[in-house]
Amino acid sequence: MKFDTPAGQNPIDQLKVVGKPTDRIDGKYKTTGMAPYAYERHDVATNQAYGYVLGAGIAKGRVRRIDMTAAKRAPGVLGIVTTLDHPRMERGMMNAAFLFGGDEVQHYHQAIAVVVAETFEQARAAAFLVKVDYDSKPGKFDLAAEAKGAKPVPGDSGEGSGGNGEERVGDFEGAFAQAPVQFDETYSTADESHAMMEPHATIAAWDGDKVTLWTSNQMIAWGHGSLAKILGVPKENVRLDSPYVGGGFGGKLFVRADAVLAALAAKAVRRPVKVALTRPLVMNNTTHRPATIQRVRIGATKDGIITAIAHESTSGNLPDGDPETAVSQTKLLYAGANRLTAMKLAHLDLPEGNAMRAPGEAPGLMVLEVAMDEMAEKLGMDPVEFRIRNDTQVDPQDPKRPFSHRDLVGCLRLGAEKFGWSKRNAKPGQVRDGQWLVGIGMAAAFRNNMVMKSGARVRLAADGTVTVETDMTDIGTGSYTIIAQTAAEMMGVSLDKVAVRLGDSSFPVSSGSGGQFGGNSSTAGVYAACVKLREAVAQRLGINSADAVFADGQVRAGNRAAPLGEAARQGEVTAEDTIEFGDISKKQQQSTFGAHFVEVGVDAYTGETRVRRMLAVCAAGRILNPKSARSQVIGGMVMGTGAALMEELAVDTKRGFFANHDLAGYEVPVHADIPHQEVVFLDEVDPMSSPMKAKGVGELGICGVGAAVANAVYNATGIRVRDYPITLDKLLDRMPDAA
Ligand code: MOS
């Protein structure tokens, strides 16, 4: 199905199943431990051996020699595959660093060997007996030191943000110089780890020249193609299966060393091999959200009309890596005739920087929305009003392009009302609750909406059950459920009559999960397949498909009615289709909007910040399942709170690695850090996005929330921290007198 004109009325609009808050159908399996993750697929292959991955102990240089004498003699060892056994292997999609092969070390903990043994403990013990000699070279590890030499480069997050190295509209410098009110500050954000619960893990088994990988991956088709390329095996001989994924956040968009090494090791020892990355390897072997240094300049009239806005970001990466696209949202969020955005990239020899939940917008809004708060204060304006005054209904860089639907103002106004914004004391440091300095802050949320080609197959059985098959993944987001809701709505059956099978590369290629494109795109693909199935059903029943009504498990046309399953009496009815998006998504700007409001308490004695209340109001098209959408948004709000207050990979700038490479040192928010969260969705549809009229919501929740936290900390204390996260050491020496 080609989607190139706005969606008209269609069966989804009935909203009998779609749009209802629905429990996740995989929820009971996940909460009872019945959903097997990749490492736990004990039943898929017999005689599984364990692989333990060894990462390089230097950040840059060469592996000169690997001595395996002692390791090979250790109990239970079945084999060792080292990077010196293979020429450098191809890279997967979107990746800068090589995963394995050859003697070059590009970053710390790059995989250099996998030790295979009968048990995990034996493999780990033997791995520590492997002796490696390196030729170490000096590397560049300090973003602040390298930032001066950074060059403007184009970049694309692959998730809907990006652009040219420098983009200009009008005359920024001239307009800024003449602006009656000027603001110019520089900020920094930290390297962050996805820190998903389930580490990267794979079981690989060969059958002749065919290999199957039970793995944990967001994008099955990408992984499928990449593994075929990396292993040098035809695509039809590779199968990936990833039905449950314990979080990804962008860290599992692409194939990682666990998959490659499981496949190589299984071949070498002629047995199925399972490999999971240890937590330190998740942090240093895989990818992370790169740190940024960002400068924002805003020029405005005295009554708060922005006349000039500039946002420049510098980040670092390996030589073939991309910049963090942190300035993207600034092209679209606020009006202003004179504009400048720039992305600069410095060469660093740290592990690879790449996509992490809302790549670009998450660190970009962390800064832009604090700058907007600072500018509002400079103007003596309310921060909500300042944003409303500078709203735009068209792309500010190309005013002929409208937004398909934009209700940022609605989010801001409703959020302000619900949160009690009018009671805020605009003067910081004034509100006390016992030992706590209390403040509230807000920020706008913005995230582009991407649409991706997506396919599905639907099968109708004689008992009236409908089975959906697509290589779409459920990374904890609720894909199983919204796909089942879509098929149930389209075929006129209840949810319990629908089975959904995901994550298998033998199924039709879907959008996959990333960039908050998965929910809308994958259900649109299921919609397309169901349109075809409805036609096939009507044909089998000998009725005109235009007259057929699918409801209550029946197909009706005129005064005829038949149970849906009757169409499959002579055999299953199958239909397959792929939704493809024409240039409809380019003619108009599709984005999602929101407003975050946060109340914090900062301990007057210790500088410790506790979040007390959070509210998000989101405008993201039709909400397919308000329950799972809310879970996505509150998850994003938790992650954004982490970025604001605690998440930071600490760079060892001498040896070139992230020192706090576990969940003891890399702090993420836990339940005790997060208060009750409220999420409100505006009731809207966007017919430009797909037949589902939905948009992405899984990343909107993280966008801007960190800035709302930071603005609340300022309102509480009067201390403006511009280097994130706001750990208490950055507040302590500037705290107001506690006594
Ligand atoms: Mo992307 S960072 O996998 O949503």
Image (cartoon, rainbow, N blue to C red):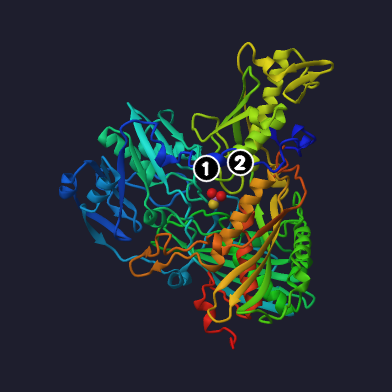
Q: Is residue 66 left or right of residue 191?
A: left
Residue 628: where, in percent of width, then height? Answer: 64, 46
Q: Is residue 23 left or right of residue 219?
A: right
Q: Quadrant of residue 335?
A: bottom right
Q: Quadrant of residue 495?
A: top right
Residue topped by disc 1: 30
Amino acid, disc 1: Lys
| Quadrant of the drawing holding the N terminus | top right
Q: Secondary structure at mark 1?
A: helix
Assess whether mark 1 and mark 2 are in contact (beta carbons under 8 angstroms). Answer: yes
Mark 2 Cα within 10 Å, few/some/many (few <14, many 20+)? some
Residue 475: where, in percent of width, then height? Answer: 53, 44
Q: Is mark 1 within 8 Å of ligand 1?
A: no
Residue 112: where, in percent of width, then height? Answer: 29, 50
**Tally of numbered discs:** 2
Q: Residue at x 76, y 42 (%)?
A: 687
Q: Residue furthest right?
A: 559
* On screen, residue 679 above or below 309: above
Q: Secondary structure at mark 2?
A: loop
Residue 259: where, in percent of width, then height? Answer: 39, 42
* On screen, residue 324 above or below 717: above
Q: Residue at x 64, y 15 (%)?
A: 568
Q: Mark number for residue 196? A: none
Mark 1 Cα within 10 Å, few/some/many (few <14, many 20+)? some
Residue topped by disc 2: 24
Amino acid, disc 2: Arg
* Residue 279 seen by the camera: yes
Between 404 and 710, the residue placed more toward the observer is 710
| Quadrant of the drawing holding the C terminus | bottom right
Q: Is residue 151 left or right of residue 541?
A: left
Q: Is mark 2 within 8 Å of ligand 1?
A: no
